[in-house]
Image (tube, coloured by chain):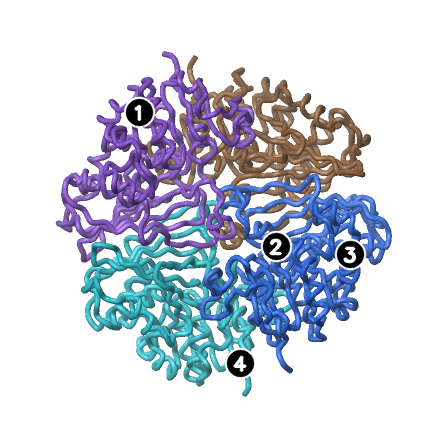
Chain colours: A blue, B brown, C purple, D cyan
Amino acid sequence: MNKIKTAIIGGTGYTGVELLRLLHEHPQAEVVAVTSREFFGQRVDSVFASLLGQCELIFSKPDDAVLNTCDVVFFATPHGVAMENAGAFIEKGIKVIDLGADFRIDDVLEWERWYGQAHTQPKLLAKAVYGLPEVFRTQIKKARLVANPGCYPTAILLALKPLLDKKIIDLSTIIADCKSGVSGAGRGTNQATLLCEASESLKAYGVGGHRHYPEIMQQLNVIANSPVRLTFVPHLVPMIRGMQASVYVDLLDPEADVHSLFNTTYENEKFVIMLTAGNYPETRNVRSSNFCQIGLQKIPNSNKLVVLSVVDNLVKGASGQAIQNMNLMFGMDETLGLEKIGLLP
Amino acid sequence: MNKIKTAIIGGTGYTGVELLRLLHEHPQAEVVAVTSREFFGQRVDSVFASLLGQCELIFSKPDDAVLNTCDVVFFATPHGVAMENAGAFIEKGIKVIDLGADFRIDDVLEWERWYGQAHTQPKLLAKAVYGLPEVFRTQIKKARLVANPGCYPTAILLALKPLLDKKIIDLSTIIADCKSGVSGAGRGTNQATLLCEASESLKAYGVGGHRHYPEIMQQLNVIANSPVRLTFVPHLVPMIRGMQASVYVDLLDPEADVHSLFNTTYENEKFVIMLTAGNYPETRNVRSSNFCQIGLQKIPNSNKLVVLSVVDNLVKGASGQAIQNMNLMFGMDETLGLEKIGLLP
Amino acid sequence: MNKIKTAIIGGTGYTGVELLRLLHEHPQAEVVAVTSREFFGQRVDSVFASLLGQCELIFSKPDDAVLNTCDVVFFATPHGVAMENAGAFIEKGIKVIDLGADFRIDDVLEWERWYGQAHTQPKLLAKAVYGLPEVFRTQIKKARLVANPGCYPTAILLALKPLLDKKIIDLSTIIADCKSGVSGAGRGTNQATLLCEASESLKAYGVGGHRHYPEIMQQLNVIANSPVRLTFVPHLVPMIRGMQASVYVDLLDPEADVHSLFNTTYENEKFVIMLTAGNYPETRNVRSSNFCQIGLQKIPNSNKLVVLSVVDNLVKGASGQAIQNMNLMFGMDETLGLEKIGLLP
Amino acid sequence: MNKIKTAIIGGTGYTGVELLRLLHEHPQAEVVAVTSREFFGQRVDSVFASLLGQCELIFSKPDDAVLNTCDVVFFATPHGVAMENAGAFIEKGIKVIDLGADFRIDDVLEWERWYGQAHTQPKLLAKAVYGLPEVFRTQIKKARLVANPGCYPTAILLALKPLLDKKIIDLSTIIADCKSGVSGAGRGTNQATLLCEASESLKAYGVGGHRHYPEIMQQLNVIANSPVRLTFVPHLVPMIRGMQASVYVDLLDPEADVHSLFNTTYENEKFVIMLTAGNYPETRNVRSSNFCQIGLQKIPNSNKLVVLSVVDNLVKGASGQAIQNMNLMFGMDETLGLEKIGLLP
């Protein structure tokens, strides 16, 4: 079998270089182009010196003809870019996986409200599949356009899916207190993410409204098939990678056997690891890997359950999940290129 | 006026050296002794080189006669030590402030259940005052024995006091998702707090039960004057100092003017700073200072309120608050020696 | 005695807020103005929330008349600003301390070569005194314009002064391998100092030439009164504050008693602390304090001596030293407001 | 071809888990046993949760018969253990790679002086090959016992090899100022490597003598074939992984074309990457990879050359190099399982 030809549009950010790292080790894929308007003509390893000795690519322009020879294109771009360019690829039979936000929210008005610009491709949007394999695997396999989920949505949805499927929690009072490493904020210059501003400190942000909120809400409503109410507060943690969702729910029956429920739901999911009772996840244990690890704790004398789920925001929360989606879209083993052990310490 | 003579029992941990730092700058106090069985006879600055050039003290034994010349003794010891030794000082008219846990929980059985040993001084315990000045100022002024609060209790109680005072929240469903820097775990050797284990990671811990839980519960019940139900989940954050409590409550009336309520409650409290609407605290903004900063956010279309409070766990969460208590116990200006600007960056 | 009235020009960077923190606790100084073109009219504590509750100042424009009521003005500005504005203050009898680089290099051409712009005030430059009290105390006391040293020069010059004074090293082969925390790079947005770029990594930078090099060279030549050759390689270390100079020299006589020499040289210097044989400094031990700690080690079977000196780059390496200079310029005790114990941990 | 059967003796430290991570992805090797006296009978992923879902191994006892079925045994143990146990494996025809220090120093007395105990296996020691492939590749291919180099020696020797080979530097005045992440200190509990002691700080350590010194000296003398004098000062840097050697040498001819020399020396070395003039390495660019990156800078107006080399202390400085050695010992492609792109950010 020939290797799948892939291209990365916008390869100068953290999800771009993470795609390069992961695709480099994928046995059935190769990267034929990485684009950057800013660095056009320069070697990719001149921007990311971690690639030295392993990658001979030169940054292409986004309209380079080589892109049309690809089987799949990854957009690792700010919102608004994939929207304008995905259609032309799809018309040529090239599959598209957007790591940005352009195709994540079905409701055009809702998207426009949160992203502050017009959505110019509602027809394309209608065809996009939400790329969370543990929920939408069947649809992803047939998709030509996948909207790769945000990192917070991935951690939260995997934490809640078993509970929503079985309808065993009060849907009106879910709280997701989330903690993210700083790489989630991207590689753009920003005073707030300077080492001297963000290290040795923790803060909540986006408390009054975060763009991942409507994305999470949409999927919660789909999975629950019923209206859900969510309080979502993200926090910035002084570390590069890693994300935890601490999700608080009210069980309808405090006696429910939640460990069994989660184990059953995820027993065939290679990338969701349930911890045994009394064990709780640490973000470092999934660093650089595509795993989500989940721990559970009931609060005594109450109907509260705490679900703790961790992912690497750049892997299962972005580039790793994109490759998982690629594997599915091309009929390959979903785990190809992703069965790596995380970096510890 | 003569300076108050102070001593620190157990001065080789983080709260001990923080007491030394703060008392060094206190205009009305001096440290006459610091004890350590292990380092007896050695210079204190040989253990803490930050003191070089500023501190000539030698570690004393805990039974050194100089302790009896003091006006106040701080116990910066593991639980169990202050219990055995505080009484002798009090009998001599020496005031005691225990930064440990021995006198924080009124119910002896409850204390024994969480700390796994017998409480040998129930009579002394009955006389102890819980040293949270914003709640128990009057009692502290007259106290001979103060139980200095834990760091989590301080952050959580200050976040909830105004709401409990006015009885405007549902007491049955409070959630405190807390985040602490690693110094809260102390200076003892422990694999889990090695840099290579604790940095670049975040984890929940003590999810099934943390010793600060009964302490918080007791005070919540006292302040609310009614039974309260609390879910408390602490997390370890990869930074040295700093603590945030993210507290989720259900307002009985979602229209309640919570900013006014908090502003009014704390308008005369020098060490509690309310942030204006749309602003949220960062732990670094109180680093090395005795301040607690609090921000508020109502969640739209719900009755949820999020209260975000930050303290430096070693200052307002430990040694700074101990000095605030000392000031009160000796009839001095409560802010003496504590009106410092925090270290930023 | 009335308090000295001070102003800070350019108070939105790290040296600016550090001046505010230190001056707040100075018993004989007060800050009457902080300027910022960008934040004019806003509260200073809206930019630096660490000041909340402790500072009522509003950012002024740099030409505000209040500046003319000051006794001393601190320039905490990028190079080029103090040069244009210092003269007017000095003419009015207001002393000036420049924390920037405009008056550090006596040779105008050399300055212009390294800073890439014309030096417009050579006459003013000729009057400036280099503000390293341990070397130029007498001159500083009489100065109207002080050029506050850079952080690397401070650490290196204090490490070498005793050796140069006594002419006991080979001047042709000095190596200073220096390590700095990231705050030395300032608060401006810069991709290279993002947390995700600078944490969990170490790199040399400016290896081919750093602006502190001519400044160090000039002073080495002055102190040695003879030509000196220096190899200076700075490194960026993943921490906020702190700087170490590891200085390698060849002793003319390997038997020289260097501990005695350093002890004698610095015995009356309050802010230089010599460590005893076998002890080496850690940057954290001077965090937030104005101290320089120095350790020495001879290399067996050679004539090599290693001098290890640490400072907090924002205190002894910038704002603390500026206040030390202010104290000298106004005939006050040099240590006023600076006898603080550093923040540990 | 059957996969090579490997075992890890002492698999509960950082080099042990790193071997597991790397061997997991090796196409021609499998791990059949990991030993631990302390955790005998427990799952390996109960100690290292990063392995969950990827590793079914149970900790064996060090004398488990399964070890005798192996082709190669890695010792990831403190010094003194491999010495006692390697011989029995070698007699059975099982190759041994010791990541510890037992076979690194040819001179028994010198070893005993630095390690404070008797060396019980001088005959075995005489057969050991020093496992630095870029220097001793031929010997490693035939070796039955490989002494895997220390991390500092690896970084320093690769920085100096081209210069020593060509005899173009003054051998009497080499200085290696080295900086290491904290994982080099291992996973044992130790107050000095607690996060609150080691983060946000930098310090020199082992200045008066470090155990890697005799190891480096021995190899320098071998490579130079002439006596060498070295000043070696290691520093602890607040990061988990990464090491830089900043090596200062005096060129005999300041006009020597050092870039060409290094490029030529290393042009066929897959794991040594030369940076072009004006570029300097960052430790993060080799994080998790087996590469050593080297940059060069001549100091103007002098004969000084600075060589900056970086490695990941746990990979090229330990477990990655061990696998590189294994590949050579078994006649496989030296790069097998090691051509990974490092983790960035």
| Distance (Cα) linking label 3 and label 1 | 70 Å
Label 3, on which residue?
A122
Residue shown at 65%/37% (left/top)? Answer: B111
Q: Which of marks 3 and 1 is in front?
A: 3
How many angstroms separate mark 4 from mark 1 (CA)? 69 Å
Please name which of the two marks, 2 or 3, marks the residue nearer to the observer: 3
Q: Nearer the viewer, mark 3 or mark 4?
A: 3
Which element type, helix, strand or loop, lies under badge 3?
A: helix
Where's the N terminus of chain B, which quadrant?
A: top left
Between marks 2 and 1 in the image, the one whose residue lies nearer the viewer: 1
**Are tags 3 and 4 found on a single chain?**
no
The residue pinned by badge 2 equals A282
User: Circles 3 and 1: CB distance less than 8 Å?
Assistant: no
Helix, strand or loop under label 1: loop
Q: Residue at x 25, y 29 (%)?
A: C123
Residue A69 visible somewhere in the drawing: yes
Chain ID at mark 4: D
The CA span between labels 2 and 1 is 50 Å
**B80, above or below D3, in the image:** above
In-front residue for pair C29/B169: C29
The type of residue carrying mark 4 is: Gln
* Circle 3 chain: A
Query: In this rendering, would B30 be left or right of D6?
Result: left
Badge 4: few (under 14), some or many (20 or more) residues near its Cα, within 10 Å? Answer: some
Q: Kindly identify which residue carries mark 4.
A: D28
Circles 2, 1 touching at the beta carbon (< 8 Å): no
Mark 1 — residue?
Answer: C334
In this orientation, which residue lies closer to the viewer: A198 or B134?
A198
Q: Which amino acid does label 3 sit on?
A: Pro
To which chain does the residue with label 2 belong? A
Kindly report which numbered mark, 2 or 4, lies closer to the viewer in this rendering.
4
For label 1, the crowd category at 10 Å Cα-Cα, with few meaning under 14, some 14 to 19 and many 20 or more, is many
